[in-house]
């Protein structure tokens, strides 16, 4: 009697597991996801197909053939409604980073069932059917997986099969990966691409934020909400209504299974445009339909344009590694928020006007920003020398056989650690905005206290995310993600986004920004402050925060500005400072010491504390990170396992 597990694919594609058997391991689940996708693609979902996993111990152990790079056939028996799969084979595919082989064969046999139910033809075991192999390669390409075609597989055949099942026309093109390997990628025909581009243009031109049909002037300064609780309920209903009516959120760019990075004229310099892409390396990743937790972080590939600090480092080759952010989940989200316990004002020509600007533009700071800028850059360079930042953000890592380098948002981190910058903080979590709208910073104790002025008005700013262009990095104000930044937890706890604003711009002036006013309630403020542990929930204390606050707030003479911080200043403000000698002179006039050290260094006690807790910190860091796509669970496991990888242990253990 076979010791096996049964998976029945019914009309609604529910997977039923024999209760007498243990749950299948993740490798088997991954095979099932691929097989299910193949059945959905061909429309073969109305038949009661069973996938049965067994040890089949009489079969040889899986091993790779050096010439073909494939394993012996995984299928023991293949009949009208059953597929028997060797357990060891699927595990070997995952353990040795060959999920594409598993994907290809799952698609091969899914196509075989279509062939049988449609034409009564029973295909031969892999690789005995050229059309089924072509279908398998085609589905791999639709998923953005580069493939090398076997000599007897023709691109035209793949295009023909894809056209038959999708009604669209395609073409294949050769690609060269950063490591020099070659393979084919799939793109739509020019006509199909232009159809999609026209749809995106229509969204761009006609996407509007809508208020609920029951909207009144409630929430205005003249008619504020009675308290913040009522204001937030209104905002939540408004966002839900806006998402339901948003052209982008309800488009194929978000909801389709396959991720196509369309080719548009403004993006001709981006080599990733015009191809089907892996889910975690595609456009709009954080907006795509998913079932991840609402407050999770999604691995999202970034454009190489903007926020690229590779020039800071000696090894320029690092810049070719794909760069990713850990972005708050934006599926079914339309708004970002900013909470303030009061609306600030500025005086212009003797009159006072409401204003909302980054902290470096407030008061007299803008008249002499140099001391604040150089402190922020010094901190950025200090962060670069943290071992985890050097590993993930500078050197890069391999996760499930894929190269990754995670975004170094140096200015954003400086913003979250007491420095003044051109950035304005936003959040995708309304509860974070609620905290800032009801609690006030207490610099004496470096914590937050309830805002107690019941006669005053608080305000919540609503920033309407204007997709598909909201995160394009070509003009200011520029919206970007800070999200998760290594072991520096503050930005993650705040589900952070950043708006980089030029001098003179007021947030009030942006057409996609709205304000909701409410009356303060001391009782509610005290409750929120208590629930947020006087700010510790969103500003968790760590050694770096204490060290940097003391250093930043001490007399300027305690600073010895590193060479790299000064290089950063010269790079970012070359229009203001003509030479390094001129910068050094100005810094000395401000009371700073000029250091001869190339980089700042972390104090030994901070690094000792980090290495002591690194495994626990890393586990916490990975807990709410997700990768899109069927392989996502293995990508996450590989990320979690980095401290055990011999190549990377140096960043976790002293």
Image (cartoon, helix red, strand yellow):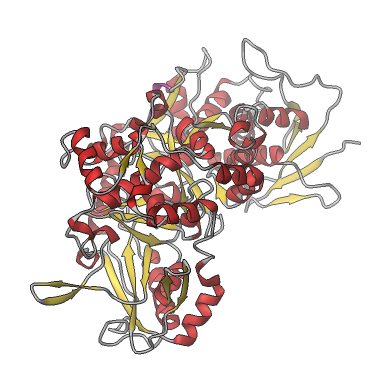
Decide if residue 383 is on the left or right side of residue 640.
Answer: left
Residue 312 place in picture, x, y as percent: 35, 32
The image quadrant that residue 578 belongs to is top left
Q: Is residue 255 visible?
A: no
Residue 527 place in picture, x, y as percent: 53, 81
Viewer-closest of 423 and 447: 447
Decide if residue 394 is on the left or right side of residue 641.
Answer: left
Residue 189 place in picture, x, y as percent: 33, 32
Taking the magenta stretch, the answer to whether it contains residue 534 is no
Our reading of the magenta stretch's main secondary structure is strand
Residue 149 place in picture, x, y as percent: 50, 18
Q: Is residue 540 visible?
A: yes
Q: Residue at x 49, y 32 (%)?
A: 396
Query: Residue pushed farthest right?
Result: 1
Decide if residue 223 is on the left or right side of residue 124.
Answer: left
Q: Residue at x 42, y 57 (%)?
A: 496
546 in relation to 521, above or below: above
Magenta-colored span: 170-176
């Amino acid at each position: 009697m076979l010791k096996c597990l049964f998976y029945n694919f019914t009309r609604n594609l529910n997977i039923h597991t024999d209760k007498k058997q243990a749950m299948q391991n993740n490798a088997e689940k991954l095979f099932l996801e691929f097989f299910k996708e193949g059945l959905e693609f061909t429309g073969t979902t109305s038949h009661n197909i069973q996938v049965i996993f067994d040890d089949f111990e009489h079969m040889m152990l899986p091993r790779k053939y050096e010439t073909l790079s494939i394993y012996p056939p995984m299928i023991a028996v293949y009949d009208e409604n059953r597929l028997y799969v060797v357990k060891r084979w699927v595990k070997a595919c995952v353990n040795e980073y060959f999920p594409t082989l598993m994907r290809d064969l799952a698609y091969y046999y899914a196509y075989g069932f279509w062939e049988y139910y449609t034409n009564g033809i029973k295909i031969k075991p892999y690789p005995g059917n050229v059309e089924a192999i072509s279908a398998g390669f085609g589905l791999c390409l639709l998923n953005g997986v580069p493939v090398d075609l076997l000599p007897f597989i023709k691109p035209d055949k793949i295009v023909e099969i894809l056209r038959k099942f999708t009604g669209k026309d395609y073409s294949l093109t050769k690609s060269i990966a950063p490591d020099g390997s070659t393979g084919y990628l799939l793109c739509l025909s020019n006509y199909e691409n232009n159809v999609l581009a026209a749809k995106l243009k229509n969204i761009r031109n006609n996407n509007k934020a809508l208020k609920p049909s029951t909207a009144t002037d409630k929430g205005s300064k003249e008619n504020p909400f009675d308290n913040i609780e009522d204001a937030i309920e209104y905002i939540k209903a408004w966002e839900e209504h806006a998402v339901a009516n948003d052209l982008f959120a309800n488009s194929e760019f978000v909801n389709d299974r396959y991720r196509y990075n369309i080719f548009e004229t403004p993006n001709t310099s981006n080599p990733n445009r015009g191809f089907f892409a892996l889910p975690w390396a595609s456009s709009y990743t954080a907006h795509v339909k998913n079932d991840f937790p609402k407050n999770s972080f999604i691995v999202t590939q970034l454009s190489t344009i903007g926020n690229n600090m590779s020039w800071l480092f000696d090894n320029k080759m690092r810049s070719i590694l794909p760069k990713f952010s850990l972005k708050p989940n934006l599926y079914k989200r339309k708004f970002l928020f900013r909470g303030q316990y009061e609306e600030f004002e500025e005086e212009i020509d003797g009159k006072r006007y409401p204003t909302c600007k980054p902290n470096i533009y407030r008061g007299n700071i803008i008249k002499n920003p140099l001391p604040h800028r150089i402190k922020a850059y010094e901190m950025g360079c200090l962060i670069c020398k943290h071992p985890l930042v050097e590993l993930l953000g500078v050197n890069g890592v391999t996760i499930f056989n894929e190269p990754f380098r995670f975004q170094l948002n140096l200015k954003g981190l400086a913003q979250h650690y007491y420095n003044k910058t051109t950035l304005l903080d936003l959040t995708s979590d309304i509860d974070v905005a609620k905290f800032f709208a009801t609690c006030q910073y207490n610099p004496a104790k470096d914590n937050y206290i309830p805002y107690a002025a019941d006669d005053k008005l608080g305000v919540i700013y609503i920033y309407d995310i204007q997709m598909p262009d909201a995160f394009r990095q070509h003009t200011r104000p520029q919206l970007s993600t800070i999200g998760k930044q290594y072991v520096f937890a503050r930005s993650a706890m705040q589900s952070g986004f950043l708006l980089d604003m030029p001098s003179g711009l007021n947030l009030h002036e942006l057409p996609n920004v709205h304000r909701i006013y409410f009356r303060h309630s001391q009782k509610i403020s005290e409750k929120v402050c208590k629930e947020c542990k006087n700010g510790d929930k969103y500003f968790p204390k760590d050694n770096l925060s204490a060290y940097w606050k003391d250093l930043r707030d001490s007399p300027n003479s305690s600073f010895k500005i590193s060479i790299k911080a000064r290089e950063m200043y010269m790079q970012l403000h070359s229009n203001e400072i003509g030479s390094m000698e001129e910068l050094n002179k100005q810094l000395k006039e401000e009371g700073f010491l000029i250091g001869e050290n190339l980089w700042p260094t972390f104090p030994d006690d901070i690094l000792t504390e980090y290495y002591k807790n690194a495994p626990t910190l890393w586990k916490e860091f990975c807990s709410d990170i997700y990768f899109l796509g069927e392989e996502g669970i293995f990508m996450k496991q590989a990320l979690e396992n980095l401290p055990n990888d011999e190549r990377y242990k140096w960043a976790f253990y002293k």
